[in-house]
Amino acid sequence: MLDDGDRKLLRVWQAEPSLSQGELAERAGMTTGRAVRRIARMQELGILQGVGVVIDWSKLGYAVQVSLRITLEKSQGNAFDGFLAQARQVPEVIEIQTFLGRVDVRLSVIARDMAHYQQIYRSKILTLPHIAEIEALMQVAQVKTSEGLPL
Amino acid sequence: MTELDEIDRRLLRALVRDAGQSAGALGRRLGLSQPATWRRIRRLEQAGVIAGRQLRLDAEKLGFGVTVFLGVKLALRGRVSLEDFERAVTAIPEVQTVEHMLGLFDYRLRVVARDLPDFERILRRRIMTLPGAGEVEANVLLSEERLAGPL
């Protein structure tokens, strides 16, 4: 589906997402017209979904990030849907992932400080439905955040 | 810490979804002039609230059908240098994110692979051989949602 030119473009762009299409074309060694056409095609195919900004929550006063690994009461058929629907309503939840493995769901929760976290945990997390077990891990540091694909 | 007003919040929400829009187009939606929009974006960038930009790619369409989260415990705690582990793990192309955690595991890794045999190869040859790597727990990602957060 993709040729070397497409991959080259994605590699360059992934490494520097702020590049303009002109700069991108130049670094990938092709004309702007050709780069624009390739990008448009990859967007049409849904390979390229766009560029978004990444927010540093610590700069907005959210110093604490906790990873909550949750096991659900799966004997109830609607446990996943019921849990997810309510977890989405908690503003401090910034990521929800579901898994195949020992853990069913993971939530990333941000808070201003530990007292604020405690309050969110008690009033908004423990009240979510169908929870069997929760394990919390606190994030000490983000060491690598690129999320790039090895193209 | 940076304080946001309502327009900053709407601007950030729009930029997280699509950072490719021009300041003019964004401004029209927020009722701001193009220069005023540009100034706000610049201020958020300078304050570090906008930490960067990220290309959003459909990993599956690019041939990466499997994403696995690994919890890694370091063996021989105290005798392994965290720097050595971090340097080595960060250099693995299939490792997209590395977080240093406090709790059940020392590190949390997000790993992409073409399929399960490819994941097994990465796990055995690259992860298990990392300096200091001890117990590893794997959870295969089934679904993922990124939420706007408290904006």
Image (cartoon, coloured by chain):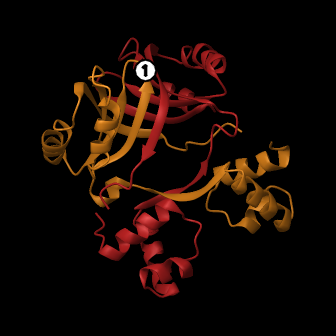
Picture quadrant of residue B122: top right
Q: Nearer the viewer, residue B73 or B66?
A: B66
Picture quadrant of residue B44: bottom left
| Residue drawn 37% across the image and 24% down it | B106
Please identify which colour was used for chain A in the image.
orange
Q: Position of residue B24 (x, y in %)?
A: 55, 82
Q: Position of residue B1 (x, y in %)?
A: 28, 63
Q: Secondary structure at mark 1?
A: strand
Left or right: B18 in relation to A63: right
| Residue drawn 38% across the image and 18% down it | A102
Q: Residues within 10 Å of mark 1 (few under 14, many from 20)?
A: many
Picture quadrant of residue B77: top left
Q: Position of residue A3 (x, y in %)?
A: 84, 44
Left or right: A86 in relation to B7: left
Q: Position of residue A11 (x, y in %)?
A: 71, 47
Residue denoted by label 1: B72
Q: Where is A23 relative to A141, above or below?
A: below
| Residue drawn 36% across the image and 26% down it | A104
**Residue type (three-letter) at the residue carrying disc 1:** Val
Q: Chain of mark 1?
A: B
Please identify which colour was used for chain B in the image.
red
Q: Where is A89 relative to A98, above or below?
A: below
Left or right: B76 in relation to B92: left
Q: Quarter of the image for the C terminus of chain A: give it.
A: top right
Q: Nearer the viewer, residue A86 or A125?
A: A86
| Residue drawn 39% across the image and 51% down it | B147
